[in-house]
Image: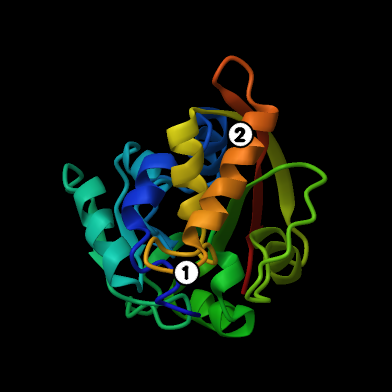
Amino acid sequence: MNTEAFTGKAQAYVKARPGYPDEAMEYIYSLAPMGAVFADIGAGTGKFTELLARYGNKIFAVEPNTDMREQLSITLSSFSNVKVVDGTAEATTLSQNSVDVITCAQAIGWFNLDAFRVECNRIGKNGIIVVSTYNDTPGDNFIPSDNRLTSKRATELFFKKPIIKEFPNPILYTREKWIQNKTSVSDSPKSSDIGYNAYVAEMNKIFDRDNKDGILRIDLVTYVYSERIG
């Protein structure tokens, strides 16, 4: 897992990355046993963790990147039920048999899947539930420039017999939020990079082409995969 891929992108990420619909969150919470302890792996800036934290369960929010983890702590500062943890998917630092549900939102593509499975079995209680959720545009064949797996492909590879649910998640972007969203992507150039201005110009062209009355609508779908492993 490249823990530095999002260094310098936390502010753009928290401002403009898509969240997750209430219906998806309610479904994920319904999978958990009463009083379940959650581990949210690759928690990033807390876009997903914050929504999960509102249910009141104890959560370990595991994030390896320093910049993202600092923003994660800010996002979750009002939730006493969440502990922010410096760890990776393959080495969470959590205690053995300490959690009931493991979640990863838009993150599993960064994991070593075999090592993650071993870690899930180590930190999970008997009958551990693993959930992977991600936002995607149906029909999109995006391939990351760094050759890592997408969340979609990694999820498909990790689970053996998952239950799969889909939830509509349309997102409306102003020009500013569209640019913030696109510059928060791990393989997009940073403002100090030579190709940054050209990249932003290209993103502006897309906005100019597809917006309607100054708003660009992207019809995302939130996918939720879940399975008991072990």
Q: Is residue 17 left or right of residue 74?
A: right
- Taking the image as drawn, is residue 218 in sight? no
| Circle 1: residue type | Ile
Give residue 221's position: percent from left, percent from top. Answer: 68, 37
Q: Earlier in the sequence, mark 1 or mark 2?
A: 1
Residue at image location 53% in from the left, 77% down from the top: 121
Q: Nearer the viewer, residue 94 or 215?
A: 215
Q: Choose between 77 and 195: the one closer to the eye.
A: 195
Q: Is residue 57 above or below residue 185?
A: above
Rendering coords of residue 61 (x, y %): 33, 61
Q: Is residue 225 above or below residue 18?
A: below
Label 2 sits on a secondary structure element that is helix
Quarter of the image holding residue 68?
bottom left
Q: Which mark is residue 207?
A: 2
Dot 1: few (<14), some (14–19), or many (≥20) neighbours within 10 Å?
few
Residue 198 image offset from top left, x and y in percent: 55, 56
Residue 184 as seen in the image, left or right of residue 221: left
Q: Nearer the viewer, mark 1 or mark 2?
A: 1
Q: Is residue 196 visible?
A: yes
* Residue in the image at 36% along x and 41% along y: 15
Instruction: Name the residue carrying label 1.
Output: 194
Disc 2 packing (10 Å; few <14; some 14–19; many ≥20): many
Picture disc at residue 73: none
